[in-house]
Each structure stands twice: as C-alpha cells, then as structure tokens.
Amino acid sequence: MAAQEAAQSQQTQGVPESRILQARQANASWLTDPTVFAVNRKPAHSNHRYFLGEATEPKQNLDGVWKVNVTQAASIDVENAPFAAADFNDAGFGAINVPEHLQMAGYLKNKYVNVQYPWDGHEDPQEPNVPENNHVAIYRRSFTLDRPLAATLENGGTVSITFHGMATAIYVWVNGTFVGYGEDGFTPNEFDITEALNVDCDNVLTVACYEYASASWLEDQDFWRLHGLFRSVELAAQPRVHVETVQIEADYNPSMAAGTLNATLQLRNANDAATVKAKLRDANGTVVWESTQCANETITLNSGALKNIAPWSAEEPTLYELTVLVVGHDGPLVEKIVQRIGFRTFRIEDGIMKLNGKRVVFKGADRHEFDAKRGRAITRQDMIDDITFCKRHNINAIRTSHYPNQEYWYDLCDEYGIYLIDETNMETHGSWVANNIETPETAVPGSKPQWEGACVDRINSMMRRDYNHPSVLIWSLGNESFAGEVFRAMSVHVHELDPNRPVHYEGVTHNRKYDDVTDIESRMYAHADEIEEYLKSDPKKPYISCEYMHAMGNSV
C-alpha cells in the first residue's frame, strides 16, 4: 500500500509538497524507497518569527537529556512500534543530550571517509538499498505543554514539532501515535502533533533515528559521518489564524537610491481575521512605509518606490524591520510577525556578478559546521566566533558546504554582512567515482526519475526556509554529484520559485550537456592558467572557484 501511495505521489505534478505522503501507520519499506522521503511532514515555509498578541513567542524547546537505546535496525519493528507506547519500560535505556551526535556520546564509532560511502569495503548494497549493519537509535523523553502552547491548542490552534537537524532518517511517535517520517536532516522536519497531544498532562515523545536510509545515497559528503539528533528539537503552537509563510523581495535601485518591498503572505483561516497591518521601520525605528488591508488567504504587500533607502551589502549590512499585525474582527491582536529585511539587488549582467549595480568579487571560503568535541552540534557562540573570524580576515563570502546551515548562521550573515552560496544537502561522490575512475552510468541521482522528487524537495525546503535572508545571493544544487536530468529539474524549480537569484552547480563540468543547469561557471582546484583561459574566451557566465584549496585542521 505504501509503495502504491508513493508511486501515485511521484506522478503528481506541481509543487514538491504534492509528493509528501500522508499515512496513519509507519512502514519499514520507506527506508529503502527513494520516492518516499517525507510522510505527514508539514510543507516547507519561511522561518519568520511570530508572536501571539504582542510579545508571546509560542515555542517550547525540548533540548536537554533524553533516554536512548542503540541497536541493530533489523531488530526493530517500526510498524507495530511497541517501544513507542507511553507506558513502555525504558529503564534500561542510556542517556544522551539533544542536540548531540551518537558518536560523540559513545554509542557509535566515529567514521571518516572522503569519496566512498562508509559501507564500501564492508558491504555492497545496491542503491537505493542500505547495508545490513544499520543502527537505529530509539530516543524517548516526556514533556508537558507550556501554558501558552496549551492555551493556543484550546483556542482552536495547532501544535507542531520540528527537528532542525538529524541524521539520517526518523520515525516519530507522540503517546504511541505515529506522527511522521522524515529525511534530509539539514532542513526542518516539522510534523503536526495536535491530535496526539495531551494538553494538561505528560506526553511521551519517541523517535527512531536510523543511521542509514535510501537518503544516505544523497549524503556522501567529505566529512565525519555522524548521526543522531544534532540540532534542536522544539514545539511551536500556531494560532487558528496564522501566517503560514512569508516570501519577500526587497529590491534596490542604485540610480534612484530607492528600494521596493514586495511580500506575499499566506494566511490560514483568513475569514476569522479582519485586517492585516504592515509597517516597515529603519534601523532607528522610524516608520518608512505602512499599509492596512483586509485579511485574505493571500496577502500581497507592495510598497512602491521608497526613496532614500540605505542598501544592504557586506561592507554596510543595513537592515530594516517589517512588522505585520493580524487583527481579529473584534479588535484583538491575533498574531504579530517580525522579519528583518535588507534592500539589495544581485544580478548577473554581461557575465559579471553585480550587487546594487556594482561588480562584486567573492573573497570567500567553504565552511563546515564543525567542532572537535561537538561535531556538527555547534553552538551560537561557535557561529559568532566564525563570523568574527571572517570579518577580521576580509572574508566576504561563504559557501555552506555542503548542506544548509543552522538558521542562526543566516541571521548573523545578514547582520554582519557575508554573501552566502546556500547549498543543498547533496553529495553523491562515491556513486560515480571508484579508484579515480568516473562511471557516469552509476551516478546518483543522474537522470533517474525515482530520485527527482527527493532532490527537488531538498532544494525547495532550503529555499523556503532561507528565502528572506539578504545574505543569500546564490542557490547551489549540491556538491560533487555529477550531472543529469534531476539537476535540470532542480534548476528549473529554483528559477520558478525565485526569479532573481542565480543557480550554482559545479558538477556540469563532468558533462557539458547540462551547462544550462548553472548560471555560473564553477570549478574545483583549477590552475591559474585554466582560469585565465576561461576569462579570455568571451565567457557568458561569471567564474567562481568553488573549491581551490582543501584544508583539514592545519594541513594547508
């Protein structure tokens, strides 16, 4: 039944959300089915801040000490899931912090490989299958809803749970009720858990986190292979009338020193609201534009030309603040939205990258989220230290190699001024290179239709989350994954969703049939004479060395 549903879902044309399955019971087959990458997951949306009334942010952090038991995947029955029952005896479980990697906590061994997959040389599964030596960590913890979330639920709202970072695939239950399945652990996996919750008493949350799934074939990045819940887990309540997502265009016209704000808001249960009020303030708090309109399912904000706007750039990262108030029929403030905005225009003109009408040169670095003791479970202070290092050393650009970063990193790049190439969670190096010999016919995803849904979904999730950040100038389809029709589909989706930002993808250098996939000529470790030759050949695309030197520790 699940496979049939997956096939039907894959045939559905349109937005990636149409490919997300709905199911009431977990199915073990999803782990090795590339067409099933999300079950019951909420549609991807912007990461705007919202408040109940004026100041209550209805979120509840679930970080801290959880119970965990790590075992072989073959011994776990996810379809009946006895370990997910609220009264299951987990006295024999160990303890682990969330966020934290299973390896750093001592439950699994550290593994590092570069090109090959971590199972190569031990087992030989054929994609999309996974090795038999596959671990699963059963996480459990209890919680009681904080009062603001419980009150929202009682007033007709909903509550969701979001896993901001996990590896590699998760099944989730609340009080024994299956609520969802998710892959792509570097963008949010959010599930509506309203129907499964106890409002005024304890709830038991259970997560089965698998080391390997079909998704592992898309995640062969050159880094330490680390697993578990490595970013925060949080609950969030949404009022009955709720702004689901915000998509903002904040362009700047350098010849007129004017900015234009265009924003689209999707409003849930719009009939229960009366008006939507918007105000844009500068860094001093002065209102530079405002509007009021009747509530509707789709709200469009259009400021027209705003004079004397200070543009955003790495050198002068000027930010404005948009506040949106959703007001009920009887006059109460239902919801408040707050979003920082940077006015800037990034375009490729005559093969040159231009920001606010002037040529821009990236003096950049690739950056992994990594700490020697915490792995990828890095802290806000780690990110502040990195951004400070970048600014002190005249680094003005970062490629998020090779996955979307924590949300706070984008806030810092907006605030301090760093240009971002935002990269999809994708690398399949080991599927098409063996012993330094390329085998295009074995490449994942290549032109294989069974992988298209998952790959388009990955870049869609990243774009929906990060769209409103002025620091994001370029979308990247991933890293070292060869080329093929799947990448063409991803590139088309990017341009349909975002008509302004260009696409980056280096992999087409291995098959020039797919040159149209990328708007930028991007190469790895090219010698100076090769770069000079390209730039003297009347190029139609700007050039970026997306990797020019590879450092591990102090090896450079």
Image (spheres, grey):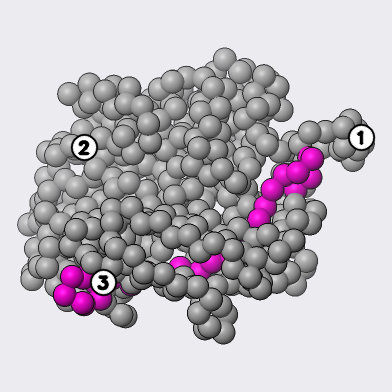
Q: Position of residue 471 (x, y in %)?
A: 61, 60
Q: Quadrant of residue 257?
A: bottom right
Q: Could you tell me which secondary element the residue under label 3 belongs to?
A: strand
Give the side of residue 102 with respect to residue 378, left or right. left
Q: Which mark is residue 536?
A: 1
Q: Which span of residues is magenta-colored?
A: 328-353
Is there a contact, CB below 8 Å, between mark 2 and mark 1? Answer: no
- What's the residue at 91%, 38% (across, down)? 532
Depth order, front residue of 193/33? 193
Is there a contact, CB below 8 Å, between mark 1 and mark 3? Answer: no
Q: Position of residue 263 (x, y in %)?
A: 46, 57
Q: Which mark is residue 129?
A: none
State which tag comes first along the sequence, 1 or 3: 3
Q: Is residue 198 visible?
A: yes
State which tag comes first along the sequence, 3 or 2: 2
The residue mark sitting in front, 1 or 3, is 3
Per the image, the residue denoted by label 2 is 22
Per the image, the residue denoted by label 3 is 327
- What's the residue at 14%, 39% (across, down)? 24
The residue mark sitting in front, 2 or 1, is 1
Q: Classify the position of the N terminus by image quarter.
A: top left
Cα gap from disc 2 to disc 1, whole angstroms: 53 Å
- What's the residue at 25%, 35% (across, down)? 21
- Dot 2 alpha-carbon crowd within 10 angstroms: few under 14, some 14 to 19, many 20 or more: some
Q: Could you tell me which secondary element the residue under label 2 belongs to?
A: loop
Q: Position of residue 440 (x, y in %)?
A: 61, 18
Depth order, front residue of 105/173? 173
